[in-house]
């Protein structure tokens, strides 16, 4: 297991000089205090439904630590990627493992390494701290990479996939973001621990940078940039004291931190019209809220109590948004995290467990426009004895209930009255045409003539749709529908 040098261990993690940690770990947070949130609106949120489980995932074999998970609710299952180290995965160093389960309660059985070090590159030894999105038919894996144990060795990389399991490094295998080097501190971690959300055409990237100007004395802090390019090679805007402003690149000065901590996770919550940042504090996982411009905090923080030893992974939808409540999607918001809870025999975080609470009484569907956003991804019975799926504000009629269930984030037994206010935009009939193209994934051609991407070939099989192989140019020539799988 890689080790941070002694001075970094003492200052980053607040541990004794005998404590060893994985290199890509930024360290445990102390008390809140170095972040600079926006102007608080001071609205208190009601919560209930506190829940927790036993250990839901472990690397197995010789994986002595397990932490930093990315958790995705997709297609009726929960998928999880996390940081560990398998002796069978070369080279020796941090690996990103993958497993899936029916719910966040696990068990996430038979994990396998899906991304390991790339010798000779910036991530030659270590890959860790995954954050995973799916936009259209493409999965994006943002991760911390390092070539060894040298100072400021951590940077953020990107890989892409059509299934979330087999990954290809993007940006020519190079890092997409490194340390800004605004300030030299004793904490020589660098940049890493990414968390990414896709919202209204923008990719929002939150990350740690111990060299950032606005980080705390120990390097703690979370910075945010955004771009409409998933690789952040162009059109980058950095969050500063005056909001988002044009930046020359991803290494622009880090002038504003949104929370004081390491290894945080970001999520967009439609029902609250706010970002949620999960970060560890003495009480447990604190969830801090910001409006979409990070100019104000519309709600008081809430706390998911329980033990922890490393940053949380929020249970999110494929786009990094909050899952919908099965009980009342207009009035409740589930906030669930998976986090490491003990320091194991290797003196590193392990024993991933699930914790959660519900925010209640949000009244999100009182505004018709907001209701369409909140209910996006839901399927419910249609008047024609088929199923209706709300996708991107449009109602898609699906002939087969099993297919609707695979595409939806949730299937309701009762039809929301908001659905009746929308016309049917397109219909997915049994045996509809399916196509697949390199770097695009799989899509279904609906009766409106548009190509609607889906996340998995399983859906086409359930629909009895034969898949036709086409070129990328042919794919791009189709009128584009929204991504069907949420």
Image (spheres, rainbow, N blue to C red):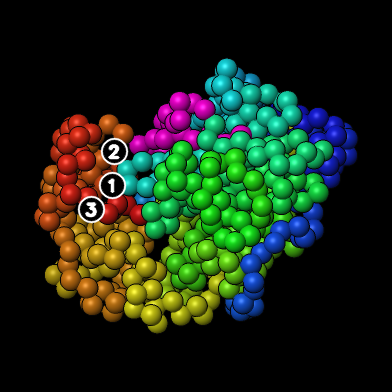
- Residue depicted at x 64% and y 72%: 39
Q: Percent from the top left, x then y, of residue 449?
A: 12, 51
For label 2, the crowd category at 10 Å Cα-Cα, with few meaning under 14, some 14 to 19 and many 20 or more, is: many
**CB contact under 8 Å: marks 1 and 3:** no
Give the structural element (helix, strand or loop) at label 3. loop
Q: Percent from the top left, x then y, of residue 229?
A: 42, 44
Quadrant of res 324: bottom left
Answer above or below: position of 317 versus 67: below
- Which residue is at the far top? 120
Spatial CA distance of label 2 from label 3 is: 14 Å
Magenta run includes residue 51 = no
Answer above or below: position of 60 versus 419: above
Q: Is residue 358 left or right of residue 102?
A: right
- Sequence-wise, the earlier of marks 1 and 3 is 1
> In front: 147, or 287?
147
- Sequence-wise, the earlier of marks 2 and 3 is 2
Answer above or below: position of 82 versus 203: above
Spatial CA distance of label 1 from label 2 is: 8 Å
Give the structural element (helix, strand or loop) at label 2. strand
Q: Is residue 64 left or right of residue 171?
A: right
According to the image, label 1 marks what residue?
Answer: 454
- Residue depicted at x 47% and y 41%: 232
Give the label on residue 288, or none.
none
For label 1, the crowd category at 10 Å Cα-Cα, with few meaning under 14, some 14 to 19 and many 20 or more, is: many
According to the image, label 3 marks what residue?
Answer: 481
- Residue depicted at x 79% and y 46%: 218
Quadrant of res 347: top right
Which stretch did the figure color magenta?
155-174
Spatial CA distance of label 1 from label 3 is: 10 Å
Please state which of the two labelled residues, at mark 2 or mark 3, is closer to the viewer.
3
Give the label on residue 441, or none.
2
């Amino acid at each position: 297991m890689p080790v941070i040098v002694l001075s970094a261990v003492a200052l980053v993690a607040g541990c004794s000089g005998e404590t060893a940690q994985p290199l890509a770990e930024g360290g445990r947070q102390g008390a809140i205090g170095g972040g600079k949130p926006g102007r608080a609106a001071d609205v208190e949120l009601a919560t209930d439904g506190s829940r927790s489980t036993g250990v839901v995932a472990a690397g197995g074999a010789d994986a002595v630590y397990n932490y930093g998970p990315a958790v995705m609710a997709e297609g009726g299952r929960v998928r999880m990627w996390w940081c560990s180290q398998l002796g069978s995965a070369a080279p020796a160093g941090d690996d990103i493992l993958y497993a899936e389960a029916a719910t966040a309660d696990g068990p996430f059985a038979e994990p396998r390494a899906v991304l390991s070090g790339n010798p000779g590159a910036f991530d030659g030894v270590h890959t860790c701290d995954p954050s995973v999105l799916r936009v259209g038919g493409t999965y994006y894996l943002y991760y911390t990479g390092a070539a060894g144990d040298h100072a400021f060795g951590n940077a953020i990389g990107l890989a892409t996939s059509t299934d979330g399991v087999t990954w290809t490094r993007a940006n020519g295998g190079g890092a997409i973001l490194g340390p800004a080097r605004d300030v030299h501190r004793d904490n020589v971690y660098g940049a890493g621990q990414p968390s990414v959300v896709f919202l209204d055409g923008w990719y929002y990237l939150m990350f740690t940078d111990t060299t950032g100007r606005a980080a705390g004395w120990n390097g703690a802090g979370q910075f945010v940039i955004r771009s409409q390019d998933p690789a952040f090679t162009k059109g980058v805007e950095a969050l500063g004291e005056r909001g988002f402003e044009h930046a020359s690149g991803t290494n622009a000065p880090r002038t504003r931190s949104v929370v004081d901590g390491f290894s945080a996770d970001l999520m967009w919550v439609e029902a609250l019209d706010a970002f949620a940042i999960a970060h560890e504090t003495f009480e447990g996982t604190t969830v801090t809220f910001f409006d979409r411009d990070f100019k104000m905090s519309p709600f008081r923080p809430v706390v998911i109590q329980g033990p922890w030893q490393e940053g949380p992974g929020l249970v999110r939808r494929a786009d990094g948004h909050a899952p919908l409540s099965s009980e009342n999607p207009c009035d409740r918001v589930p906030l669930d995290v998976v986090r490491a809870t003990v320091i194991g025999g290797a003196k590193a975080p392990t024993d991933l467990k699930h914790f959660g609470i519900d925010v209640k009484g949000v009244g999100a569907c009182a505004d018709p426009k907001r209701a369409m956003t909140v209910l996006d991804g839901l399927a419910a019975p249609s008047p024609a004895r088929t199923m209706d799926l709300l996708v991107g504000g449009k109602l898609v009629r699906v002939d087969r209930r099993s297919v609707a269930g695979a595409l939806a984030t949730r299937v309701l037994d009762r039809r929301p009255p908001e659905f009746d206010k929308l016309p049917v935009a397109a219909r997915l009939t049994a045996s509809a045409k399916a196509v697949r193209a390199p770097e695009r994934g799989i899509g279904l051609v609906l009766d409106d003539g548009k190509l609607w991407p889906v996340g998995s070939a399983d859906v086409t099989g359930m629909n009895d749709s034969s898949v036709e192989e086409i070129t990328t140019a042919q794919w791009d020539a189709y009128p584009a529908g929204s991504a069907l799988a949420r």
